[in-house]
Amino acid sequence: MDDQRKPTDGSPTDTGKDDTPLGPSNAIGRRLRAYYEDVAAEPVPDRFLSLLDALDAAEKKSKTSGTGE
């Protein structure tokens, strides 16, 4: 298993897209990054935004009333 982590002679991996010697791990990382970017680009649902607004309002009310709850 250690052989997978040792640097090679600097030649590109099987994919030819990256110089790191991780091979399949590099491909998995690229796919995970692409998936994360797709999810992060999705719009936030209106219901979730409403809940966040309600939480902000409750925090402001708590701070102004001085109860700290």
Image (cartoon, helix red, strand yellow):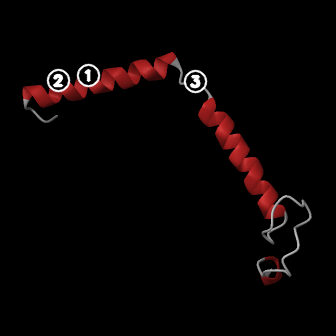
Under circle 2, the secondary element is helix
Residue 17 location in percent, x, y? Answer: 85, 58
- The residue depicted at 20 percent of the width and 26 percent of the height is 60
Query: Residue lying furthest right in this view?
Result: 14
Can you identify the residue that label 1 sits on?
Answer: 57
| Vertical side of 50 occupied by 55: above or below | below
Q: CA–CA distance between discs 1 and 3?
A: 22 Å
Q: Position of residue 13 (x, y in %)?
A: 88, 67
Q: Amino acid at mark 3?
A: Pro
**Image position of 8 (left or right of 60):** right
As displayed, is residue 36 above or below residue 4?
A: above
Q: Are marks 2 and 1 in contact (CB under 8 Å)?
A: yes
Q: Earlier in the sequence, mark 3 or mark 2?
A: 3
Q: Give percent across and percent down for residue 45.
A: 53, 20
Most foreground residue, 48 or 12: 12
For marks 1 and 3, the one nearer the N-term is 3
Q: Which residue is mark 3?
A: 43
Q: Amino acid at mark 2?
A: Lys
Based on the displayed image, in which of its 4 quarters is residue 12 positioned?
Answer: bottom right
Question: Pointer 1: residues within 10 angstroms few (<14), some, or many (20+)?
Answer: few
Q: Which residue is mark 2?
A: 61
Give the mark toward the camera: 3 or 2: 3
User: Which quarter shows the C terminus?
Assistant: top left
At 71% across and 41% down in the image, what residue appears? Answer: 35
Q: Secondary structure at mark 1?
A: helix
Q: Quadrant of the N terminus?
A: bottom right
Left-right relation of 60 to 2: left
